[in-house]
Image (spheres, rainbow, N blue to C red):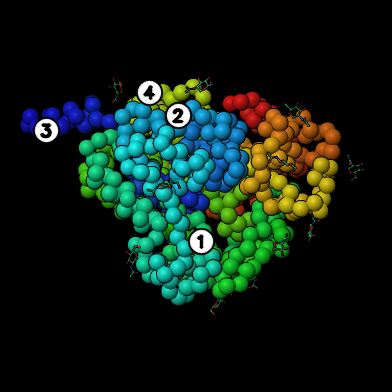
Amino acid sequence: MVVILFSLCVAGVTAQKNVVWFIVDDLRPQFVSYGQTFMQTPNVDALVSRSVVFDRAYAQFAVCAPSRNSFMTGRRPDRTQAFNFADDFREVGANWTTLPEHFKNHGYVTLGGGKTFHPNLPPNYDEPYSWSQDEPYYNFTDDTCDEAVSPVPPYDGRDDEICTVSNASALWDYRMASKGIEWMGKYVDRPFFFALGMRRPHLKSIVPVDVFESYPERDDDVPAQATFPRDIHNIAWCCNYSAKLNGTDVYSQGPWYQAYDNYTTSELRRGYYASVTWVDSQIGRVLTAVDNYGLVNDTIVVLHGDHGYQLGEKSCWRKQTNFELATRVPLLVSAPFLSGPKRVPYPVELVDLYKTLADLANITAPEPSVQGKSLAAYFDDSTPSEYGRFFSAYSQFDRCPSDTAVDVNNLTASDNVTAFHGGCSETAKQNITFMGYTLRTLDWRYTVWLYFNGTSLKGDWGDCHVADGFCPTELYRHGASEDLGDFERFEPTNLASQPGHAALKVKLHAQLQAHFQSDQ
Ligand SMILES: *[C@@H]1O[C@H](CO)[C@@H](O)[C@H](O)[C@H]1NC(C)=O
Ligand SMILES: *[C@@H]1O[C@H](CO)[C@@H](O)[C@H](O)[C@H]1NC(C)=O
Ligand SMILES: *[C@@H]1O[C@H](CO)[C@@H](O)[C@H](O)[C@H]1NC(C)=O
Ligand SMILES: *[C@@H]1O[C@H](CO)[C@@H](O)[C@H](O)[C@H]1NC(C)=O
Ligand SMILES: *[C@@H]1O[C@H](CO)[C@@H](O)[C@H](O)[C@H]1NC(C)=O
Ligand SMILES: *[C@@H]1O[C@H](CO)[C@@H](O)[C@H](O)[C@H]1NC(C)=O
Ligand SMILES: *[C@@H]1O[C@H](CO)[C@@H](O)[C@H](O)[C@H]1NC(C)=O
Ligand SMILES: *[C@@H]1O[C@H](CO)[C@@H](O)[C@H](O)[C@H]1NC(C)=O
Ligand SMILES: *[C@@H]1O[C@H](CO)[C@@H](O)[C@H](O)[C@H]1NC(C)=O
Ligand SMILES: *[C@@H]1O[C@H](CO)[C@@H](O)[C@H](O)[C@H]1NC(C)=O
Ligand SMILES: *[C@@H]1O[C@H](CO)[C@@H](O)[C@H](O)[C@H]1NC(C)=O
Ligand SMILES: *[C@@H]1O[C@H](CO)[C@@H](O)[C@H](O)[C@H]1NC(C)=O
């Protein structure tokens, strides 16, 4: 009896809660529990059944380095000034306390591995600041389709988008999960914060052959809308990626065409599904360890993607757009000591994670320049169900010309700008040409593409309705009753130029401009 009382006391009052944080590369909500019923994702689905699930959660920038600079620091891209693969937040935030560092400052063992920060952005995964130095950072080493992983048919080629392998334990996600389990065994007696950067479903689809073959070979797994809608300005489209299967590169003919033939489309999607199932199994190994150590009620488990993903919808592949599929991420937070399972329908943002985790772990408030909001109220049963009904989520994405076929300084709204899709990934922030800004409410998405001012690092909002008038806008209907599992039909029609929405557009435009012109 005495022993039981003692342990209740320790668990209930003084014990600090651990954190296990899965950051999964290129992960959209491709799970049974998110309506993708043909998937095999038992481990994440089990986590869903004990988590607060944020059904409308958005990345601030739909590509890796800018998004990670944002959520790892709790600052929006306009504050990190990291919009590309050249700049990182330490250039402007030399003394900022990152999210893991905040936990480290409160006595946690903070250990990281894989892609938490993007490699070298900031340098050396932010060592030594973010991590407690009990163990070295577990450096990311990407898989390659070579002897180490024992490639076997049907995709045993070295330079294909898919690679089927027989040695699963050689893959990064296996090694990352094993490292997390090893750390747990070693630091089980101290409060720990482990950030595990998982690689798949990012390309290439290097997966165990049995996982790949558990999804059928097809030639008809093609999105219902596989070309770019004509009523959306094509600056919104991205990108002309090559797809290589059987050693042959296939290129897109542009937004107005289905990017790849039906068989290639179906196989690339099959590779993504298999990658999600593979990473699900490795997440499951870590969650089993949490369970085996008896830590379920003492551990906050967080899982999300760094941004969403497109698998040929609207002729878009990968990320790098401002559309729903590229910006929306799965976001699960399990804190069973505070809350049972729940699904939150209101828009939230990855930048909210910092304050949320600090609150759930009951550590002191972050420094004032941390942005976003705490979502901790969702873990309190007394919070009204309408809480957050009017939240908005903000994202942005840049565009730079890849050639000089059009006069980029003098566009008209009807210009054909497929020439822009080279992207800005290596372009210094001062030289970015355009920025697309978007906001998501429960009911709508509104987007505007603007010239970018490389001095102020803001969109040229004043230019929108004057000068050359280049200011393409998009308006999409969403709403509480939309089918969030119907990935093929998000945002099918741009309502921006249709009659009847003028007042709404003015209102959303003002909200978007107020947000991005200030330094919120
Ligand atoms: C970081 O440096 C700035 C500029 O010197 C200062 O205003 C700010 O208080 C510092 N922040 C922290 C967390 O030390
Ligand atoms: C990780 O990479 C950094 C920078 O490249 C290097 O200094 C460090 O030694 C590496 N750590 C390990 C454990 O290999
Ligand atoms: C599989 O990979 C592991 C880890 O790299 C290695 O130790 C093992 O020898 C490999 N097994 C085979 C059969 O190649
Ligand atoms: C896509 O890229 C390929 C290879 O660079 C090129 O041949 C093709 O014309 C491009 N397509 C478009 C629509 O730009
Ligand atoms: C590709 O798939 C689409 C949609 O299922 C279908 O309409 C079309 O006929 C197919 N194309 C070919 C060449 O089979
Ligand atoms: C790849 O090769 C297989 C077997 O030869 C063939 O069935 C398939 O159509 C090829 N895929 C592509 C995309 O060419
Ligand atoms: C976790 O806590 C809940 C609520 O206090 C309790 O019902 C459950 O049995 C606990 N689970 C474990 C594994 O301790
Ligand atoms: C949170 O921390 C404060 C002081 O740091 C402590 O008084 C309080 O009991 C803690 N709350 C919970 C729920 O652990
Ligand atoms: C922009 O293009 C229009 C024609 O499309 C032309 O009349 C105008 O002079 C150009 N303006 C500049 C500043 O080049
Ligand atoms: C844009 O340019 C491409 C390539 O030149 C062409 O195929 C397409 O029809 C053009 N689209 C429009 C809307 O002019
Ligand atoms: C911006 O572009 C100009 C012209 O290409 C180049 O000279 C300059 O170095 C670039 N600025 C940065 C910061 O890279
Ligand atoms: C860009 O921003 C700077 C600093 O705010 C301002 O001085 C300049 O006029 C702006 N440039 C344009 C083209 O608006």
Give the Cα separation between the discs numbered 1 and 3.
51 Å
Q: Determine the CA span between mark 2 and mark 4.
A: 13 Å
- Look at the numbered disc 4 and give the secondary structure of its residue: loop
Amino acid on which disc 1 is placed: Lys
CA separation in Å, label 1 and label 4: 41 Å
Name the mark nearer the viewer: 2 or 3: 2
Label located before the other in sequence (1 or 4): 1
- Nearer to the camera, 230 or 128: 128
For label 3, the SS is helix
What residue sits right under mark 3 in the picture?
Answer: 4
Tell me whether the residue at label 4 lies in contact with that at label 3, contact meaning CB atoms closer than 8 angstroms: no
Ligand 8 within 8 angstroms of badge 4 C-beta: yes
Residue at 22% from the left image edge and 37% from the top image edge:
189
Give the quadrant of ligand 3.
Answer: bottom left
Q: Is mark 3 within 8 Å of ligand 7?
A: no
Vertical relation: 117 (above or below) 385: below
| Circle 2 SS class | loop
Cα separation, mark 2 vs mark 1, equals 33 Å
Q: Nearer the viewer, mark 2 or mark 1?
A: 2
Q: Which residue is mark 1?
A: 204
Mark 2 Cβ and ligand 1 under 8 Å apart: yes
Q: Which residue is mark 2?
A: 97
Q: Residue at x 69, y 56 (%)?
A: 228
